Amino acid sequence: MWVTAKVLERIDWNDKLFSLKLTPGITDFTAGQFIKLSRVRDDKRIARAYSLVNPPGKDYCEVLAVAVEGGELSPHLRAMAVGDEIDITASAAGFMTLQEVPAGFKHLWLLSTGTAVGPFISMMLTDEPWHKFEKLVLVYGVRQVQDLAYLTQLRALEQRYPQQFKLVISVTRESYAGGLNCRIPEGLSSGAIEAAAGVSLNAEDSQVMLCGNPEMVADANNYLLSRGLTKNLRRVPGNITLEKYW
C-alpha cells in the first residue's frame, strides 16, 4: 500500500549524498527496517528500498540516499525540495534488526559502508542496544571525508556513552585525523579495527551486523567465518547477521 508523503526537510552532505525527512511518519516499526520510496513515470511504478535513519516513534521518516548517475529514482529524490511529494510504503519491513540477534553476548559490532550506516543509527537512537550489550562498536567506512553523514550525531553518542560506545571511522581515499585508511575487511584481517576499538572480536563475546557494499559484506563475512564466528540463522543462532545494499 502506498501513501503520499511530503518532504519536510532535506540535508545535503555533499553533491550526491543527502537525507530526506518525510511526513507523515511511520511510528510503528523496528529500528533497522526499511521503507520503499516510489514514483510513477510513463505509467510505470519505480520503487526502491531505503532504510529508516530515525528511531521509532517520530512523526517523520528519515532516509539517507546517494544519487546514482542514470538511476531511475535517486536523481529524482536528489532534486526534491521541501514540500514536494513522493509515494512511500505505509509500513516498514526487513529483518536487519536487533530482535534477530541472539541474547547472551557482551559486544555488538556494527560494520557499515556509505549509506548503510542509516539503520545502525536508527538502532543506536533506541535504548535496546545500550541495555543489551556491554560494548557497542560502529565501524563506518567511506571513500572520502565528505561522505561521512551524521557525524555530529555519532559524536554525540560518544559523549553520551563514553564507556560503552566506540566509533571507528575508516576513509579509504584520503586521510582523516583519528581514523583508519583501509577497507573494512583489510582492517579486520590486519587487526587495525580491533586495536582502534579496544575490543576483542571473537565468537564467544561478539555479535556482528554487516550492512553495505556487497563486496565488503562478502569479504568481511569470509574473514569472520575464518575466525570461528558463524552465520546467525533463526533455526541456528550464530554471530553474523548481514544485509547487502544492492
Image (cartoon, rainbow, N blue to C red):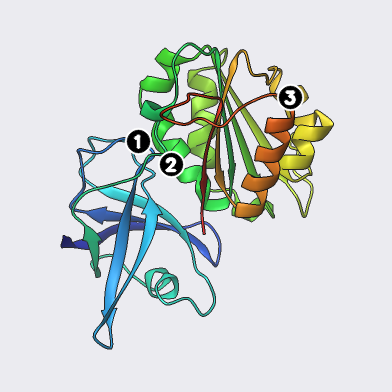
Q: Position of residue 12 (x, y in %)?
A: 47, 60
63 relative position to 207: left or right: left
Q: Residue at x 27, y 35 (%)?
A: 56
Q: Is residue 125 visible?
A: no
> Which residue in the structure is indicated by mark 1?
31
Q: Position of residue 45 (x, y in %)?
A: 27, 76
**Label 1: how many residues lie within 10 Å, few (<14), some (14-19) or many (20+)?**
many
Three-letter amino acid code of the residue under disc 1: Ala
Q: Earlier in the sequence, mark 2 or mark 3?
A: 2
Q: Is residue 44 above or below residue 83?
A: below
> Which residue in the structure is indicated by mark 2?
119
Q: Is residue 222 above or below residue 66?
A: above
Label 2 to label 3: alpha-carbon separation: 22 Å
Q: Earlier in the sequence, mark 2 or mark 1?
A: 1
Q: Is residue 7 visible?
A: yes
Q: Position of residue 222 (x, y in %)?
A: 70, 39
Three-letter amino acid code of the residue under disc 2: Pro
> Which residue in the structure is indicated by mark 3?
194
Q: Residue at x 41, y 29 (%)?
A: 234
Q: Is residue 45 above or below residue 234?
A: below
- Outermost bottom residue: 42
**Label 2: how many residues lie within 10 Å, few (<14), some (14-19) or many (20+)?**
many
Are the residues tagged 2 and 1 within 8 Å (C-beta)? yes
